[in-house]
Amino acid sequence: MDHEAALLLVAGVAVFAGAVVQGGVGFGLGLVAAPVITLLDPTVMPGAVQVVNMTMPLFTLAREWRRTEWRGAGFALLGRLPGSAAGALVIVYVSTATLGVLVGVMVLAAVVLTARAVAVPRNGATLTAAGFLSGITGTATGIGGPPIALVYQSARGPEIRATLATFFCLSAAQSLVILGLLGRLPARALVAGAALVPFVLLGHAASGPLRRYLDGGRVRGAVLAVAAVSACALLGQSLAR
């Protein structure tokens, strides 16, 4: 096996694992795949992971699109647009490592607070703010799920998955456009992302048992756990830069 094939296989396993998690919880593909792909080939990031971030939600929506909370997705996307612009400024002018540490600490703090039953109200203000923060981190690092997922942690599994899928699909497309305009989207990043799509499909297909297990009243704990792991992954990725 040559070097390129080995790298593709390792990245593919990470994408597969992330797709299984996201297929069950509603997010998590970026948190598993982004650190691994960054270690393997940082030159294709964050473009490659945004390609898979845009693809995975299509499989979820094909099954559960009727459960989308369109109002919530709209508010989140409203915040995502200026957040993506801020993320673009981070890429150009600010250390993404510094951003990653700050956001990782913020997400861990939010997980601790919400795990102790501090309710996160789901309204226009919180959704727009979560979309804004997700836009910054998603565009700059490829990990944008935790802020919006924390706001939806008390929703039912199908509603979380469908609403987040709508948000992630459109926001990943938005980030790809912004990266392209900034000249930070090399063709090899798109090729790498496209080569990982089969692993996305396999992971989604394998996520059925996890999805059924979590829908039995366990989805909130899973959201908090994945958000905490995501924050730790972001911290690790940022400190390793």
Image (cartoon, rainbow, N blue to C red):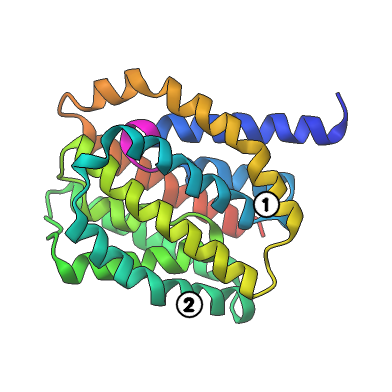
Residue 190 is situated, as x and y percent measured from the top left of the image, at 67, 52
Residue 222 is situated, as x and y percent measured from the top left of the image, at 29, 35
Mark 2 vs mark 1, CA separation in Å: 21 Å
Instruction: Inspect this view and state whether residue 100 appears.
Output: no
Residue 32 is situated, as x and y percent measured from the top left of the image, at 52, 40
Which residue bears the numbered disc 1?
190
Residue 26 is situated, as x and y percent measured from the top left of the image, at 33, 40
Check whether the beta carbons of the residues at disc 2 and disc 1 lie within 8 A of each other: no
Total numbered circles: 2
Towards the viewer: 169 or 146: 169
Which residue bears the numbered disc 2?
85
Quadrant of res 2: top right
Q: Identify the residue at image location x=48%, y=65%.
A: 174
Q: Identify the residue at image location x=27%, y=57%.
A: 110
On the rendered structure, is 107 left or right of 127?
right
Amino acid on which disc 2 is placed: Ala
Q: Which of marks 2 and 1 is in front?
A: 1
The N terminus, quarter of image = top right
Residue furthest toward the top?
A: 209
Amino acid on which disc 1 is placed: Leu
Tell me where the magenta segment starts and ends, as one range: 23-28
Relative to 125, say whether 41 is above or below.
above
User: Badge 1: few (under 14), some or many (20 or more) residues near its Cα, within 10 Å?
Assistant: many
Towards the viewer: 224 or 151: 151
On the rendered structure, is 100 left or right of 38?
left
- Identify the mark at residue 123; answer none if there is no mark: none
